[in-house]
Amino acid sequence: MPLMMRATERTAGLVRAVRQEQLGFSTPCAKFDVKDLINHLEWVAEMFESLGRGGSSVEQGPYAGDFPERAERTLAAWSRPEAWEGTSPAMGLPMTTLAHMYLVDMVVHGWDLARATGQEYEPDSEAVSRALHFTDRMVETGRQRGAFGPPVAVPDDAPRFDRLLGVIGRDPAWTP
């Protein structure tokens, strides 16, 4: 939970700093511009709030510009001990797996947004370690489900965050 909180707070801070004129900027996530990426984050927050409360999967709605508020509700849902127990009825996955999926989204999409908008971003090192360990185990499933792209080669001795980005299909050297 502390890792989720720190990653969410960092990403929410980045979202708050986005200026209107930046919404059309490209991001390292090829299928999203900045506005689409924030809309995706809104959906992620809404989805994981529902899942954390034992609810169903939700459809992505239109851009609302309220990611930080949605993210607070997500964290509230996951702050309950029962949110971490058992298997999600909606997804058929252990709740701890869902929490890791959320963490990966916050860490990586935070970087996407920072890179696209020229903001500083230093992900939490413990969150990066946890996200890398999780994605190393789940990468093929993630690719099959369209969540991760083809791997990007990075040196074996690259920083952990660069390795995480490469595993899920991001080029750590991406610039706008």
Image: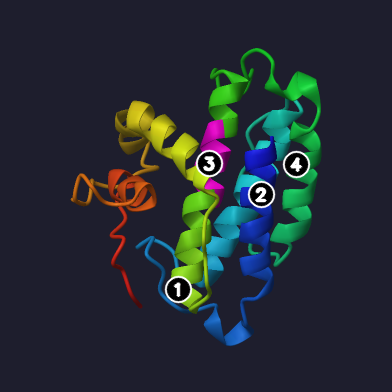
Mark 2 residue element: helix
Q: What whole-number distance in Å separates the C-alpha atoms at marks 1 and 4?
A: 25 Å
Q: Earlier in the sequence, mark 2 or mark 1?
A: 2
Mark 1 Cα shell of 10 Å, populated few (<14), some (14-19), many (≥20): many
Q: Is residue 84 above or below residue 154?
A: above
The amino acid marked with disc number 4 is: Leu
Please name which of the two marks, 1 or 3, marks the residue nearer to the observer: 3
Q: Is residue 105 magenta?
A: yes
Q: Is residue 89 above or below residue 32?
A: above
Mark 2 Cα shell of 10 Å, populated few (<14), some (14-19), many (≥20): some
Which segment did they paint magenta? Answer: 100-106
Q: Earlier in the sequence, mark 1 or mark 3?
A: 1
Q: Position of residue 90 (x, y in %)?
A: 62, 23
The residue where tag 1 is placed is 116
Contact between marks 1 and 4 (CB within 8 A): the answer is no
The amino acid marked with disc number 2 is: Arg
The residue where tag 3 is placed is 126
Horizontal side of 16 relative to 168 (left or right) equals: right
The residue where tag 4 is placed is 75
Q: Position of residue 79 (x, y in %)?
A: 79, 33
Please name which of the two marks, 2 or 1, marks the residue nearer to the observer: 2
Judge whether residue 60 can be spotted in this image.
no
The residue where tag 2 is placed is 6
Q: What whole-number distance in Å separates the C-alpha atoms at marks 2 and 3?
A: 10 Å
Q: Is residue 164 above or below residue 65?
A: above
Q: Earlier in the sequence, mark 1 or mark 4?
A: 4
Mark 3 residue element: helix
Mark 4 residue element: helix
